[in-house]
Image (cartoon, grey):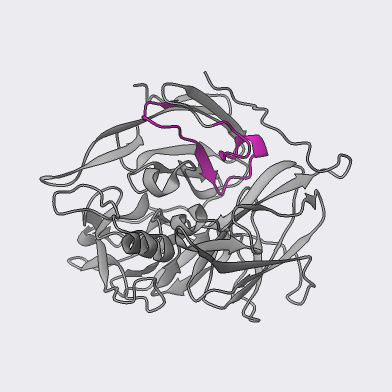
Amino acid sequence: MNKTMEIGPNTVIYHLEASEFGWDIAPGKTVPAWGFNRQVPGPVLKAKKGDTLVVRVKNNLREPTIVHWHGIRLPALMDGTGDVQEPIKPGAEFEYRFVVPDAGTFWYHSHANETVQLERGMYGALIVEDAADPVFDRERVLVLDDMKLTADHNFTQPGWFLERWIESHMGREGNTMLLNGKEVPALDMPAGQIERWRFINASSARYVLLSLGGNPFRMIGTDGGLLETPRILTEFLLSPGERIDVAAGPFAEGETFSIESLPFLGSHDSKKNLETYATVQIGAAQPSRAFLPEKLNTIEVLAPKDAPATRNIEFSLGLSLSKGADFLVNGKRHGLDQPVKVGTLQVWEIKNSTLMHHPFHLHGFFFQVLELNGQAPEYLAWKDTFNIPPSGTLKIAWMPDNRPGMWMYHCHVLEHHATGMMAGFEVIDGSEPAGKVHLAHVGHCQ
């Protein structure tokens, strides 16, 4: 196994090996994990804005896999889905190669048999840095996850029909909370310092109403990078697949608190209680070099709030004789939507006609939220994942730049995606008719 990072001029090379192994989530508690480089989460991949990232993936699982680069604006053929890439067969290798054009907190995860492979640990963080980033005393990547385990630390397998229906309908929410692959780890932090905490919700279906023990924190970034100005919060709803960067601290010496998820009444699990992901102990004070400016970024508005929709999309539920229910996009399971043209502004209105939450995820492009249920957002941000509440309507704007090919959007509750709540679409350059994309690879399998 080679997990060495090689750095050349503006090129960063990583080696990832997908395999099965025993992973200790707590003392005396080992789970039969699947993951990258024998760890959960996989190694944190780092690059600088504008670098070329090369990731060579070796598949030593007993089934095919694909790696999706969640949030990265890359070529369609590198997106890591079955529409653009043949799955990496057991024993085979594939090389992903793309430029990382944006600074921010991203992640990579399997996009094959996701409800099994992500549940067992096939994910990791991808951090893209910029010389213009704010200065902190320390940065931490904090990946939140949950696993649904039996009493002997194996993954549960839904048996009879009703159990399977509940899990596919509600999403798989686990009974074991993990932060960076560990069950309630203890974190230490000096008093008087300010750290950048990059949160990633890698859960299959769990919504995290994030709290730092009720302490205020400054939200500085979301999916697509820095906000224009920091926002002071005490909680933030982090849907599956979503990210948030916060400035944590300064805290007082001797203070203790938990990184936790507050009860969320809108959760799929109406009985959800407060969940603890980690404890934080504040130690002796140390000098701080942190500098967080009031102006972080400039974001240009893509469209006004009342811009007319160019596309209407409906997330809905249908009956299924075999599964009880199908999750649908425009009345279809895993359907094909109409193409969009490079350089033509897209204003999409997505209606959630169900009585549950759905995190909408757009592959390969960032969007701006224009409205949620008719209300404009309080701040401007670049997003790739955004929650649509029950019976809610989300209106977004995004611009397809010159990266033609096949893309997709879907609900990031993995069981809903697997059961049908996904649609593909093609970005075309305007000079070629739609339907010309086929499985030709920039990378290569061996």
Q: How many marks?
A: 0
Q: Residue furthest right?
A: 431
**Residue 426 at x, y = what percent?**
73, 46
Q: Is residue 397 left or right of residue 256?
A: right
Q: Is residue 324 magenta?
A: no
Q: Is residue 138 left or right of residue 384?
A: left
Q: Nearer the viewer, residue 181 or 18?
A: 18
Q: Residue furthest left?
A: 28
Q: Nearer the viewer, residue 231 or 42?
A: 42
Q: Residue furthest bottom?
A: 374
**Residue 429 at x, y = what percent?**
83, 43
Q: Which residues are magenta?
A: 58-86
Q: Is residue 292 left or right of residue 352?
A: left
**Residue name at image x 38 percent, y 43 percent:** 117
**Residue name at image x 48 percent, y 61 percent:** 321
User: Can you tell which quarter of the image residue 385 is in?
Assistant: bottom right
User: Can you tell which quarter of the image residue 444 is in?
Assistant: top right
**Residue name at image x 47 percent, y 73 percent:** 356
Residue 124, can we see it? Answer: yes
Q: Nearer the viewer, residue 151 or 121?
A: 151
Residue 294, can we see it? Answer: no
The chief SS type of the magenta part is loop
**Residue 139 at x, y = what percent?**
38, 50
- Residue 284 higher or lower than 112, as above or below: below
Q: Residue furthest top?
A: 446
Locate the N terminus by quadrant.
Answer: top left
**Residue 246 at x, y = what percent?**
43, 62
Q: Is residue 76 magenta?
A: yes
**Residue name at image x 58 percent, y 45 percent:** 72
